[in-house]
Image (tube, helix red, strand yellow):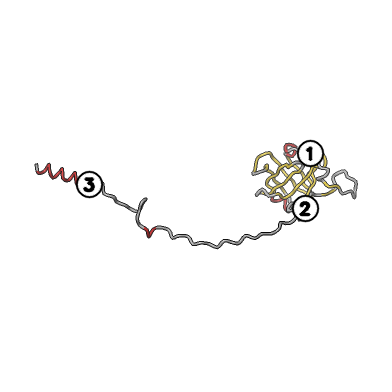
Amino acid sequence: MRVFHAAAGLVIVLALTGCQRTSFGGFGSQDVSAAPAPLQAQPVPSVSAGQLPDPTTSTSQFPSAPTGTPAGAPAGTQVAAATNALDVTKESMVGNWRVSSAGSSCDMFLTLTNLGSGSRGGTRGCAGELTAMGSWEVAGKQVVLKDRSGNPIARLYKTADSRFDGSTNGGQPVSLSR
């Protein structure tokens, strides 16, 4: 009987030991030294008030429309390519183009494969800003050539069948033809 009482007592002790609360630093830990220090307040810059510039007289952040003499125009006649631009579709742009820019020529390839906000494109043998071309898009009557980050680098307008004229952001004239 003693063994039975001893075993029963041991079972009760073990059961009561299992009910004790133990903590190993997890949730509910009372170790305050491990808490992060409070953040320090930072100064807030003051807000200034003032009149915005008149939008009709300030300079625009966008380049002006390129001007040039389209193919077949009389010599000496400067015609704004944007004013006389013909309608253009994205599908009509796909394929190989011969590029003339800054007195040199190179090749441009345009696809319909999506790349960011435009379609994939590229150049071979070009110089200047056009070496960074990675994509393009049609926006209204305008073809926008973009760098690999999606920033516009040139804007072109359809001036004749299979011919586009415009300029780079740096002001260099650009012409595409087939």
Label 1 secondary element: loop
The local crowd at label 1, few if under 14, some if 14 to 19, many if 20 or more residues have their Cα within 10 Å, is few
Judged by depth in the image, the label closer to the viewer, 2 or 3, is 2
Hey, what amino acid is under mark 3? Answer: Leu
Give the position of the N terminus as an image quadrant.
top left
Hey, what amino acid is under mark 1? Answer: Asp
For the residues marked 2 and 3, what is the alpha-carbon distance in whole angstroms? 84 Å
**Residue at x 35% of width, y 55% of height:** 30
Is residue 161 rendered to the left or right of residue 21? right
Q: Which residue is mark 2?
A: 56
Labels in figure, total: 3
Hey, what amino acid is under mark 2? Answer: Thr
Residue 11, given in percent of the width and then of the height, sits at 19, 44
**Residue at x 65% of width, y 49% of height:** 149
Label 3 secondary element: helix
N-terminal-most mark, 1 or 3: 3
Q: Which residue is mark 1?
A: 87
In the image, 85 versus 146, the foreground residue is: 85
